[in-house]
């Protein structure tokens, strides 16, 4: 049986594979608010989704309920939220080919090569501070299925069009 601290350590080491400077990323997670700058396009990419789309599908903006919804929605994978910017980040494989543009899904963007983003320490799992994992990575490389992310975004757009905006 693997303990939570052991899983978190393994996930942290895996995420460090996306850091240009692993020592700096460790310090940022430990000392500087728990957010480290990681590069997209190698081992991971991220689909950035405005919170209002996620909340429309979840039918709530209460973060604990949204977190429970996301744990049910995704069959594995990891999602964190930037509380200040009100953006969700669904982690996907670095080779993801996102075929949608801003006209299809306003505000949604797939961060790939030549993009960086602030990723919270894996220990931040409560909605406080700058960002937190609302669907923590359970094991190294536990990424969302692109089809599930796309379905979430499409359903969010449809829910908002039907007047379900939050």
Image (cartoon, grey):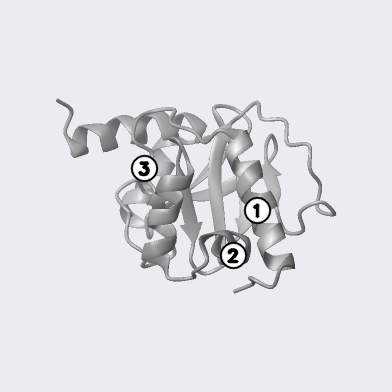
User: Circle 2 sits on which residue?
Assistant: 56
The location of residue 13, given as percent across then percent down, is 36, 30
Residue, disc 1: 155
Of marks 1 and 3, which one's residue comes earlier in the chain? 3
Q: Residues within 10 Å of mark 2 (few under 14, many from 20)?
A: many
Q: Residue at x 28, y 38 (%)?
A: 8
Relative side of 107 to 103, left or right: left
**Is residue 163 visible in this depiction of the protein?**
yes
Mark 2 or mark 3, which has the lower sequence index? 3
71 vs 47, left or right, is: left
- The residue under the point 36% across, 42% down is 26
In the displayed structure, 114 sits above or below 159; it is above
Query: From where the camera sits, is residue 40 visible?
Result: no
For mark 3, does the 10 Å Cα neighbourhood hold few (<14), some (14 to 19), or many (20 or more) residues?
some
Mark closer to the observer (1, 3): 1
Q: Is residue 122 above or below residue 42?
A: below
Q: Which residue is mark 3?
A: 26
Earlier-in-chain disc, 2 versus 1: 2
Residue at 71% across, 49% down: 109
Q: Position of residue 133 (x, y in %)?
A: 40, 52
| Secondary-structure class at tag 3 | helix
| Mark 1, secondary structure of its residue | helix
Determine the CA span between mark 2 and mark 3.
35 Å
CB under 8 Å between callouts 2 and 1?
yes
Q: CB atoms at circles 1 and 3 under 8 Å apart?
A: no
Q: Position of residue 31 (x, y in %)?
A: 32, 55
């Amino acid at each position: 049986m693997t303990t939570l601290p052991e899983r978190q350590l393994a996930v942290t080491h895996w995420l460090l594979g996306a850091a240009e400077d692993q020592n700096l990323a460790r310090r940022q997670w430990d000392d500087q608010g728990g957010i480290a700058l990681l590069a997209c396009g190698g081992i991971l990419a991220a689909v950035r989704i405005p919170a209002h789309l996620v909340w429309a599908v979840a039918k709530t903006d209460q973060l604990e309920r949204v977190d429970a919804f996301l744990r049910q929605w995704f069959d594995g994978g990891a999602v964190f939220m930037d509380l200040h910017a009100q953006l969700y980040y669904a982690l996907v494989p670095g080779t993801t080919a996102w075929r949608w543009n801003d006209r299809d899904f306003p505000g949604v963007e797939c961060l790939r090569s030549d993009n960086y983003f602030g990723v919270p320490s894996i220990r931040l799992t409560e909605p406080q501070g700058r960002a937190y994992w609302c669907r923590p990575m359970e094991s190294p490389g536990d990424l969302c299925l692109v089809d599930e992310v796309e379905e979430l975004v499409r359903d969010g757009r449809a829910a908002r069009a039907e007047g379900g905006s939050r």
